[in-house]
Image: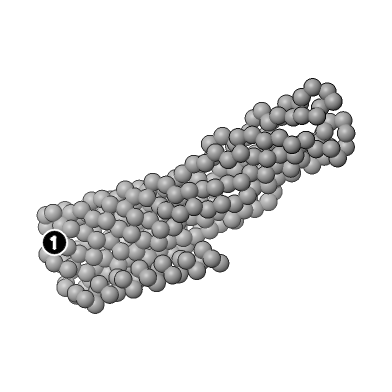
Amino acid sequence: MHKTTRIVAWCGALLFAGASVAQAQMLPWGDKGYATFSFGLQAGSQTFTETSTPVIYGENASITVPHSVGGGGLVDFSGGMRVWKNLAVGLGYSRTSSSETPTLAAQIPNPLIFNSPRSASGSTGELEHKETAIHLQLLWMVPITNEFEVAAIFGPVFYNITQDFVGNVGIAEGAPPFGTVTITSVERLTQSKRATGFEAGVDATYRLTPRYGAGAFMRFSGASADMETAGGGTVTVSAGNFEIGVGARVRF
């Protein structure tokens, strides 16, 4: 609910900014279409906890993994055609990824004594979070001068979210009477899920020539999906956030 509220607020603010620009200056747009290519960053972070209860020595163990996924680098490109006055319809693609190395906490049953678990912890190794997105865009282009123009962009976003979780863990027993246990290996389990969200943003371009220019964008988008863990439970994993980028712009 909190993330949805933030999305609505950011979308409203960005659309208001784009509308204000459009009202301030409404020049005709003479190009047939556009293409963009940008590098940028996705801000924000998310946390969620993964739990599983595998059976070891005839009892349920408990394994807890606290995930903390941060922002990451972003690659983004798009293109579209003008369909009416300053309105264009476009399609975009973006990709971002980040990694984490959480420490799992485990309660491992004793092989000799029932209901006497031992505590253990260990690194999961590097776990990755990836997002690819298809952006269906409506773009309203506002030329401010012959060289400078601003576009308000909004539309649905179709995400594919890929997240690494923890699968089976390997253990090594200490000396009898087995009062200690050590985590020796951690299996990585990769899951993917699709989710649909919404984006709103602005893109500014400065034309270096009539056809080619440099530009920057900022936007907010977001979605979330419930993903299955190895233990049979689910966690909610988010995609998108506030994003900025710079790169090349082409008009044709």
Image x and y of residue 121, in percent:
67, 35
Image x and y of residue 22, in percent:
24, 74
Q: Closer to the camera, 49 or 234? A: 49
Q: Residue furthest bottom?
A: 23
Instruction: Indicate the colouring scheme.
Output: one colour
The answer to whether residue 155 of the structure is visible from this angle is no
40 relative position to 72: left or right: left
Q: For numbered disc 1, what is the local secondary structure?
A: loop
Q: Which residue is mark 1?
A: 147
105 relative position to 112: left or right: left
Instruction: Using a 10 Å C-alpha cutoff, classify the residue at mark 1 as few (fewer than 14 neighbours), some (14 to 19) or many (20 or more).
Output: few
Image x and y of residue 186, in percent:
63, 33
As shown in the figure, which amino acid type bears the numbered disc 1? Answer: Glu
Q: Residue furthest top?
A: 175
Q: Quadrant of the C terminus?
A: bottom left
90 relative position to 6: left or right: left
The answer to whether residue 206 of the structure is visible from this angle is yes
Image x and y of residue 188, in percent:
59, 37
| Residue at 33% in and 59% down | 218
Q: Closer to the camera, 176 or 28? A: 176
| Residue at 76% in and 26% down | 173
| Residue at 64% in and 47% down | 50
